[in-house]
Image (cartoon, helix red, strand yellow):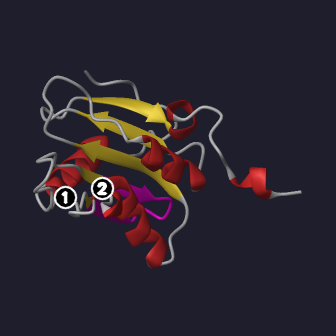
């Protein structure tokens, strides 16, 4: 199932999905065996990938989406156009967890989010639709 692209008509969705699938191969998930990869596209056209990295102290684990965003921010990029997320579940489209939805929203309400299946089918969403009424920086202003 391919959903019509919304805002990012020039995004090579298939390439972004393939990069997220490649990132998934680096997943460190010995406890859940739930591999996830992400590929994040900046407004400058640079792509940062990430995978989930688990820890025996489960709360210290980090998701693929946050790994990609942290890598990008640590290199000076803070504006993102799209992110693709890949997993191994053939029965449903993988979707960012609540923490990752909030993390994505921090950097832009209009970031395109591609939820995928292993067969490369996808659903295109917008960050603000994945986390309606999310907590954003305006909550911290006077």
Dominant secondary-structure state across the stretch colored magenta: strand
- The number of discs equals 2
Q: Is residue 66 left or right of residue 30?
A: right
* Residue matched to label 1: 23
Inspect the magenta stretch and tell me whether residue 89 lies in it. Answer: no
Query: The magenta stretch spans which residues?
Result: 39-50
Q: Position of residue 4 (x, y in %)?
A: 39, 25
CB-based contact (under 8 Å), mark 1 and mark 2: yes
Q: Residue at x 42, y 45 (%)?
A: 10
Q: Position of residue 60 (x, y in %)?
A: 33, 64
Please, what secondary structure does the residue beneath circle 2 have?
A: helix
Question: Label 1 vs label 2: CA separation?
Answer: 8 Å
Q: Residue at x 26, y 29 (%)?
A: 93
The C terminus is located in which quarter?
bottom right
Residue mark closest to the camera, 1 vs 2:
2
* Residue matched to label 2: 64
Q: Is residue 16 left or right of residue 77?
A: left
Q: Give above or below for 142 relative to 121.
A: below
Q: Residue 123 occupies which quadrant of the picture?
A: top left
Q: Residue 17 occupies which quadrant of the picture?
A: top left
């Amino acid at each position: 199932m391919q959903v019509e692209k919304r805002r990012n008509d020039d995004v090579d969705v298939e390439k972004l999905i393939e990069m997220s699938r490649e990132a998934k191969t680096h997943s460190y998930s010995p406890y859940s065996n739930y591999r996830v990869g992400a590929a994040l596209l900046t407004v400058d056209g640079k792509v940062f990938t990430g995978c989930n990295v688990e820890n025996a102290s489960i709360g210290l684990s980090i998701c693929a989406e946050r790994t990609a965003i942290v890598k990008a921010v640590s290199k000076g990029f803070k504006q993102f156009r799209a992110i693709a997320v890949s997993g191994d579940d053939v029965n449903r489209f993988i979707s960012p967890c609540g923490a990752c939805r909030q993390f994505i929203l921090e950097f832009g309400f209009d970031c395109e989010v591609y939820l995928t299946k292993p067969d490369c089918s996808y659903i295109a969403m917008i960050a603000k639709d994945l986390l309606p009424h999310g907590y954003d920086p305006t909550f911290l202003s006077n």
